[in-house]
Amino acid sequence: SWSSIYHFVWDRLWSVRQDMTVQDIRGTTCITVLEQAVRFYVYASLRSCQEGPNSGFDAHINGQHLQECLKRLLVLYCEIDWKTHSHQPEMEAIYLLHNLGSTEALAHAVGLPRCLREQVLVRAAMETSMAHWSGNFVRVLRNYRAFPFLLACALHPHLGQIRRHALQVLTSAYSSRNCRIPMSTLSQWLHCTDKEARDICLSYNVPLENSEVKFLKGTGDFSARQVPSVLDPYLKQALSRIDVAAVLTQDARTAS
């Protein structure tokens, strides 16, 4: 089962990472191991959504280990020329998306050498994180659909929060007893299907009338701190056709 595979690989990776720390292993060998660990944690986060809440997957612990690997990589990259290790742009982009909207992550990205900062993946991730920080959910969701598979996976855990925030903004911006927003329009804004948009509205008790949404201030329940982690159908479809080995061993530009 996926749960058994995940826990086995997680345990092996943890042991290898501990050994590298104890032996103070650095350089390209350490970087290669950590990069593959990052890809595994990012992929596992999405794959475990497919299994449901009874899979035994702990998203918080998985996210912690992903963050530790990314932070360690950022330190190790300072010791080499990134042009000799071409996966750094991919990892920098994943770091930005995993820490979406974080001023610390954005400040780190701004401080990167210009030639690295202007790499396609890094530039796109910076733009997306800035958009999230400024509340521009339309741009965030548009970029999400344009990302290669692994980068979309890195952003996926934030998706529920992004769409909840979008509904909160729209509830205030379009509040009117006489205003109705077609479900097809809302689905375009949220970059999902009409059915998904309807389900999202129902989950937050946003008023619906037939195939239209009625936004009114004071309606909708957005009080829940945690947003349930649900596999986005867009990535579910991608998950069914990707080569997992390619995702875990290649960079985001070639594994799409």
Image (cartoon, helix red, strand yellow):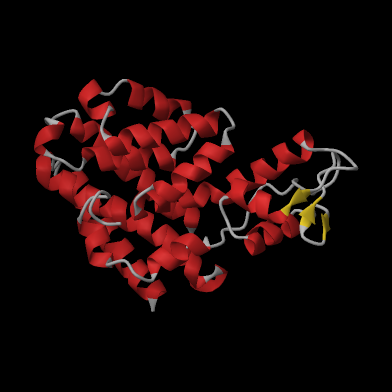
What x and y, as percent, mark residue 60?
Answer: 49, 52
Q: In which quarter of the image is the C terminus?
A: bottom left
* Relative to 68, residue 52 above or below: below
Q: Is residue 56 visible from the viewing direction of this image?
A: no
Query: Is any part of residue 123 visible from this angle?
Result: yes
Position of residue 49 relative to residue 165, above or below, is below
Q: Nearer the viewer, residue 124 or 27?
A: 124
Left or right: 12, with 172 as reference point: left
* Residue lying at the far right of the rendered structure: 177
Looking at the rendered image, the quarter that the N terminus falls into is bottom left
Residue 44 spot, x, y in % from top left: 39, 61
Say how many tags the image has. 0
Q: In this view, does 234 lie above or below 151?
A: below
Identify the residue at horizontal 60%, vertical 60% (top origin): 193
Residue shown at 46% from the left, 66% from the top: 236
* Residue placed most toward the observer, 9 or 159: 159
Residue 40 % position (x, y): 31, 58
Q: Is residue 129 left or right of residue 91?
A: right
Residue 55 position within the rendered picture, expressed as x and y whole percent measured from the top left: 49, 71
Choose between 47 and 123: the one closer to the eye. 123
Q: Residue at x 65, y 41 (%)?
A: 165
- Left of 242 or right of it: where is 19? left
Q: In this view, does 214 lie to the left or right of 167?
A: right
